[in-house]
Amino acid sequence: MAGLADVHALLFDVFGTVVDWRGSITREVERLGKEHGIDGDWNEFAKTWGRGYIENTQRIAHGGEGSLSVDVMHRESLQNMLDTPQWKPFGDKLTNEARDELNLIWHKLDGWPDATPGLYALKKEAIIATLSNGNVRLLLNMAKHADLPWDTILSAELFGSFKPDPNVYLGAIKHLSLEPHNCAMVAAHLFDLRGAASVGMRTVYIPRPGENPNGEEVKLRADNGDVDIVVESFTELAAILAKRK
Amino acid sequence: MAGLADVHALLFDVFGTVVDWRGSITREVERLGKEHGIDGDWNEFAKTWGRGYIENTQRIAHGGEGSLSVDVMHRESLQNMLDTPQWKPFGDKLTNEARDELNLIWHKLDGWPDATPGLYALKKEAIIATLSNGNVRLLLNMAKHADLPWDTILSAELFGSFKPDPNVYLGAIKHLSLEPHNCAMVAAHLFDLRGAASVGMRTVYIPRPGENPNGEEVKLRADNGDVDIVVESFTELAAILAKRK
């Protein structure tokens, strides 16, 4: 607990950490498929769509070229997927307008069950803000949809790159007028926590189903120094922070 | 009402529009004065301190030099005031540490009576965000202190200038992924509303006691085209927006 004693602000990864993107997308495309009489592995569809986002943001974070708008990125990935033989029958049913609308599912993802009650409890203990690769508007819409009571929305978009580029973490810390060790990154992904730790932030790891497909969570332990603390839910994190007083 | 039909986001000036800075500062310095046995015109003290902020931000908005941190600006103004013959007796009682602490009063200003209930109601009708010359951390602390349920905190600090520099309004609009006419500026000051209108935003004027010492509010009427709408409270604005559905 020593690691979090001086933490005044918690910065949250959002996709996978706060909201269950894969479950939400799977449910939506499955519903849409049924509506058009198309069958398919919808969980696989969701995973592939999400992977395009991860690959693009990581490439840009490390200096590559590409759109800084996650909305544009998702729309391009969708277009590419619907052109593949596997998903063309589904794509044939979707007009450009229907594709634009489907793309907005990324603004309406559902929170993990502990997300909303956990964030309300955490808001009493510290500043709670997003620090996501998603754009500001997307994060705003998601907060309204899933009842996520952020104190403010911080996005990689404001700092011209993507996590784990150190400039993203440093930009957020600067605008909070805090020192790095007064801020903790909360995430379900080790690459994000390593990026935060590299600039001196504290780190909170929360395992979420399917978010570390390479089995990182098994190797990852607070007591071997990879992260400062591991929690199972936001409500558990709130209880830990409440004990500081 | 036509003017607000397509508004998806309301951007709020904060000092004077949402919070009663003069009343809050006056109460605090009066309390502190009594504690040290000093008497003075505390309302005048508050007004002078606030004026330093307004003059500095306006100068920088129009291309002048100076600190972009409103905390630094307030601290320098305080230092200068406490060196004047009028306030030196008060200054003599305040250590540097006490002055630093007094400076934080700007993070703990009280909302006008309609602010909190009005913002909760408005949050159901549109995105509600600050667009203040105050820095992000100050606005975050104020929101926690006065229970202001912003969807996000936008600050001139993020865009490297101050209102009424058009870049501040345009930066906010861009990060909300909206067109200017989908955003309304809500303010008690005509210079701010003119700046917003100059980039194509809608404008909501709310008169607040003492905020327009030159009698601007008397000359200002929605029906002569200065602003799109005039309201007496945030709750009135929420009722107007609720009727759009």
Image (cartoon, coloured by chain):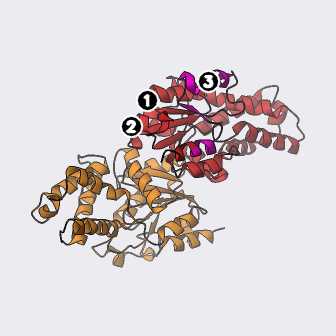
Chain colours: A red, B orange
SS class, disc 3? loop
Question: Label 3 vs label 2: CA separation?
Answer: 26 Å
Q: Is residue A207 above or below residue B192?
A: above
User: In this figure, which residue is indicated by the disc labeled 1?
Assistant: A200
> Between residues B210 and A204, which one lies in front from this camera angle?
A204
User: In this figure, which residue is indicated by the disc labeled 3?
Assistant: A220
User: In this figure, which residue is indicated by the disc labeled 2?
Assistant: A179
Asked if the residues shown at circle 1 and circle 2 are in contact, with their CB atoms under 8 angstroms apart, the answer is yes
Magenta span has A217? yes
Give the chain letter at badge 3. Answer: A
- Please identify the residue farthest to the left as the structure is shown: B85
Closer to the observer: label 3 or label 2? 3
Q: At which x and y percent is residue B136?
A: 41, 49
If you read the primary sequence from the N terminus, does the residue marked by circle 1 or circle 2 appear first? 2
Question: Label 1 vs label 2: CA separation?
Answer: 9 Å
Near mark 2 (Cα within 10 A), the count class, few <14, some 14-19 or many ≥20, is: some
Q: Is residue B25 left or right of residue B180?
A: left
Q: At which x and y percent is residue B21?
A: 34, 65
Question: Label 3 vs label 1: CA separation?
Answer: 19 Å
> Between residues A42 and A16, which one lies in front from this camera angle?
A16
Magenta part of the chain: A210-239
Q: Quadrant of residue A229?
A: top right
SS class, disc 2? loop
SS class, disc 1? loop
Residue type beneath disc 2:
Glu
If you read the primary sequence from the N terminus, does the residue marked by circle 3 or circle 1 appear first? 1
Residue type beneath disc 1:
Gly
Near mark 1 (Cα within 10 A), the count class, few <14, some 14-19 or many ≥20, is: some
